[in-house]
Amino acid sequence: KLSSHKKIVYDAFIAAIGEEVSVDFYIYNNDFTLFKKFLTNKKEDYSHYVIIPHFIDGEEYAQEIINTIPKEKLIMLDKRIAGVEGEYGAAYENFEKNIYDALEQALSHLSKYHTLKIIFPDKSYFPKEILRGFHRFCQQYAFSHKVVSNISAEPIAEGEVFISLMEDDLVILVERIIGMKFKVGKDVGVISYNETPLKKIILNGITTISTDFKFMGTIAANLILDNSRRHVEVPFYYTKRASL
């Protein structure tokens, strides 16, 4: 399954790399075992390997398999993995800093709420650095805050803001808020992680905090075309819409 925001990365990469380049595309669904199988059983000697290394389990072993790739052929996207050695190209997110800075930009809009809740499922590929940035912001600006693992069972009250990382959780959250007769953006705030075109339309617009996925895909292609081993931090944006 290719998420909407990862499709933006892929489309931008294909547009920038050019039609003369052949690209094989593999989806491993954040499953480390499948990821390892793809790399250990590779039958093609590719000029480059572009990897988005997010895993639900097994991340502690990722550096071992990634280190088998010649570093002049490696491009890491979205996240850098500790223990990956040598000089390679990367376009990455600074997860802790990004969520802190984005929420700081939203501070004037958050001021009418008293509690921030971030929906972070127990089995999630999202980096824990996001939670560190979230906690740091809430402590700095004296917001009550909570990490929610299951939005289906979480109480929803007036004056709360929910930050949803997963698209499925966003759907459940919005359905529950509407079912409880709360007004989104007035009684309860909603912020969604990762921008997609549909979020401009839902409920007159869902507020997002998001990296620039188009930029990420374009940079990945440029790193290959330029044979570069630079590490580029991808911009992260707060987009205010009606849900906050």
Image (cartoon, grey):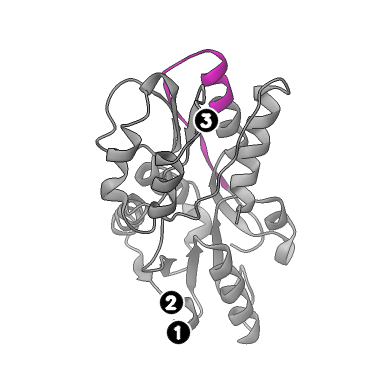
Residue at mark 1 to residue at mark 3: CA–CA distance: 47 Å
User: Which region of the structure is painted magenta?
Assistant: 220-238
Q: Is residue 228 magenta?
A: yes
In the rendered image, which quarter is residue 215 located in? top right
Amino acid under disc 3: Glu
What residue is disc 3 on?
Answer: 44
Image quarter in which the C terminus is found = bottom right
The answer to whether the residues at label 2 and label 1 have Cβ atoms under 8 Å apart is yes
Q: Is residue 115 visible?
A: yes
Nearer mark to the viewer, of 1 and 3: 3
Q: Earlier in the sequence, mark 1 or mark 3?
A: 3
Q: Earlier in the sequence, mark 2 or mark 3?
A: 3
**Front position in the image: 142 or 18:** 18
**Front position in the image: 25 or 107:** 25
Residue, far bottom: 180
What residue is disc 2 on?
Answer: 150
In the rendered image, which quarter is residue 139 located in? bottom left
Neighbourhood count class around disc 2 (C-alpha, 10 Å): few under 14, some 14–19, many 20 upward: few
Amino acid under disc 1: Ala
Amino acid under disc 2: Asn
